[in-house]
């Protein structure tokens, strides 16, 4: 009689075998998780650095162009000395100093970010007053701290002046232009009977020049949008009280429309916990425009070269005997941070800039330092 066994050929796992299998499985899972985390961190860092590099490239490109053109639009071809009256009140934010036309560029150094300084950098720091910056003789123009996103600490500020000559505009000798009037009417040359749109907005600066006589007056237009009349009355940034134009401006008059640009670092409009590079143009005044150029720029550091000198100087320590009219080049340093925190650990970084300046940073973002030196074309003389 055949017997059947209930035991099959398949044997079960023992407890020890099961535990070994679980341990091996856990090791494989842990390795996969570790690989995933490492890959994710690498991707985040690489992506962050790519964003940083792109932001820095754009910021440097824009600033390079504006710095090279500082002082452009030379009055009378830049060859004739002019007797000049600047009617703009210096209290109007320092714009009067930038309208001297011998100065195309001016910088303001933030205290403690100059030669051989070490900065313990905190991107969240917002406490600063105009006195924290200096151009060697005065503090930062106050309007730069009155914006919705004001200039932030541990970053320098750069001011640039260019000039746009107004084509087909001259003075009107037939329209009672005289030295004692606050108004100056403009015409279309050579027909002094036809008015011409001067294109200077209310609250914007202008310069009228007579190259034949060597006179220039600089003022802020206070006219209420009269296209053919420039008004240089007292107030609204002017100090013209009882003063007279240097000459009667007629058909030999040239009109120049100065443009002022200010570069500074402020809180980003899209994320107030991040910093960004801003540019303000034609400020202060009704035509003032403030734009955020590049997010992620956390500090702008600037050093300057002056004529006949290969050294670099901070804005508050130009060499004795030199002024802003002697500046021939600008060395820019941009500290740019990643858009995201790339690690769960604190990343200690030390960034070394020119002239022994160091930035020490300790947080979870990755940063890169980008530098470039730009020559000011309109300040270079060729023998």
Image (cartoon, rainbow, N blue to C red):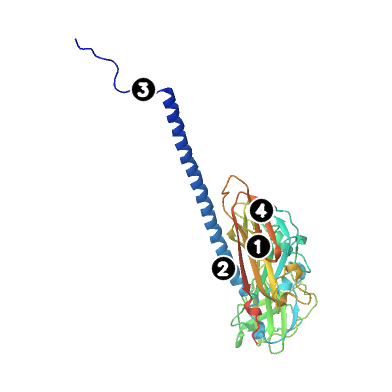
Q: What is the CA distance from the residue labelled 4 to the residue labelled 2?
A: 26 Å
Q: Is residue 314 left or right of residue 279?
A: right
Q: What is the CA distance from the residue labelled 4 to the residue labelled 1?
A: 15 Å
State the image coordinates of residue 153 (x, y, percent, origin top left). 71, 57
Residue at which label 1 appears: 300
Q: Residues within 10 Å of mark 2 (few under 14, many from 20)?
A: few
State the image coordinates of residue 171 (x, y, percent, origin top left). 66, 84
* Of the two numbered discs 4 and 1 in the rendering, the one whose residue sits closer to the viewer: 4
* Of the two numbered discs 3 and 4 in the rendering, the one whose residue sits closer to the viewer: 3
Question: Residue at coordinates 66% horizontally, 61% vertically from top-left?
Answer: 352
- Report the disc number at residue 12: 3
State the image coordinates of residue 239 (x, y, percent, origin top left). 78, 72
The reply to whether discs 3 and 2 touch (Cβ–Cβ < 8 Å) is no
Residue at which label 4 appears: 361
Going from N to C along the chain, the mark reached first, 4 or 1, is 1
Going from N to C along the chain, the mark reached first, 4 or 2, is 2
Question: Residue at coordinates 44% horizontally, 33% vertically from top-left?
Answer: 24
Q: What is the CA distance from the residue labelled 2 to the residue labelled 1?
A: 14 Å
Residue at which label 2 appears: 61
Q: Is residue 139 left or right of residue 339?
A: right
Question: Residue at coordinates 52% horizontally, 57% vertically from top-left?
Answer: 50
Q: What is the CA distance from the residue labelled 1 to the residue labelled 3?
A: 71 Å
Q: What is the CA distance from the residue labelled 3 to the residue labelled 4?
A: 60 Å
Going from N to C along the chain, the mark reached first, 3 or 2, is 3
Q: Is residue 353 left or right of residue 90?
A: left
Outermost residue to the front: 1
The reply to whether discs 3 and 4 touch (Cβ–Cβ < 8 Å) is no
Q: Residues within 10 Å of mark 4 (few under 14, many from 20)?
A: many
């Amino acid at each position: 009689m055949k017997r059947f066994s209930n035991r099959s050929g398949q044997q079960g796992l023992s407890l020890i075998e099961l535990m070994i299998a679980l341990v091996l499985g856990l090791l494989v899972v842990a390795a996969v998780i570790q690989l995933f985390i490492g890959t994710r961190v690498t991707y985040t860092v690489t992506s962050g650095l790519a964003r940083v590099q792109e932001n820095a490239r754009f910021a440097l490109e824009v600033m390079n162009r504006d710095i090279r053109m500082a002082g452009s639009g030379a009055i009378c071809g830049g060859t004739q000395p002019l007797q000049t009256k600047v009617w703009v009140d210096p209290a109007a934010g320092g714009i009067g100093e930038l309208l001297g036309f011998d100065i195309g560029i001016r910088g303001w150094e933030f205290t403690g970010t100059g030669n051989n300084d070490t900065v313990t950098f905190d991107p969240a720091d917002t406490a600063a007053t105009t006195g924290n910056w200096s151009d060697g003789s005065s503090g930062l123009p106050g309007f730069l701290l009155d914006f919705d996103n004001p200039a932030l600490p541990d970053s320098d500020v750069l001011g640039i002046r260019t000039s746009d000559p107004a084509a087909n505009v001259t003075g009107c000798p037939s329209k009672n232009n005289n030295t004692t009037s606050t108004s100056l009417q403009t015409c279309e040359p050579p027909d002094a009977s036809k008015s011409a749109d001067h294109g200077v907005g209310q609250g914007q600066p202008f310069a009228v020049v007579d190259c034949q006589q060597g006179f220039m007056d600089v003022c802020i237009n206070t006219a209420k949008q009269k296209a053919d009349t420039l008004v240089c009355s007292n107030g609204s940034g002017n100090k013209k009280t009882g003063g007279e134009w240097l000459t009667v401006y007629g058909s030999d008059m040239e009109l120049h429309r100065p443009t002022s640009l200010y570069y500074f670092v402020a809180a980003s409009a899209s994320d107030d916990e991040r910093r960004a590079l801003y540019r303000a143009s034609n400020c202060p005044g009704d035509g003032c425009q403030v734009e955020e150029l590049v997010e992620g720029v956390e500090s702008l550091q600037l050093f300057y070269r002056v004529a006949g000198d290969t050294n670099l100087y901070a804005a508050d320590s130009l060499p004795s005997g030199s002024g802003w009219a002697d500046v021939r080049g600008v060395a820019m340093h941009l500290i740019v941070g990643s858009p995201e925190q790339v690690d769960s650990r604190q990343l200690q970084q030390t960034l070394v800039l020119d002239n022994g300046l160091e930035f020490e940073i300790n947080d979870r973002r990755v940063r890169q330092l980008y530098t470039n030196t730009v020559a000011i074309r309109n300040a270079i003389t060729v023998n």
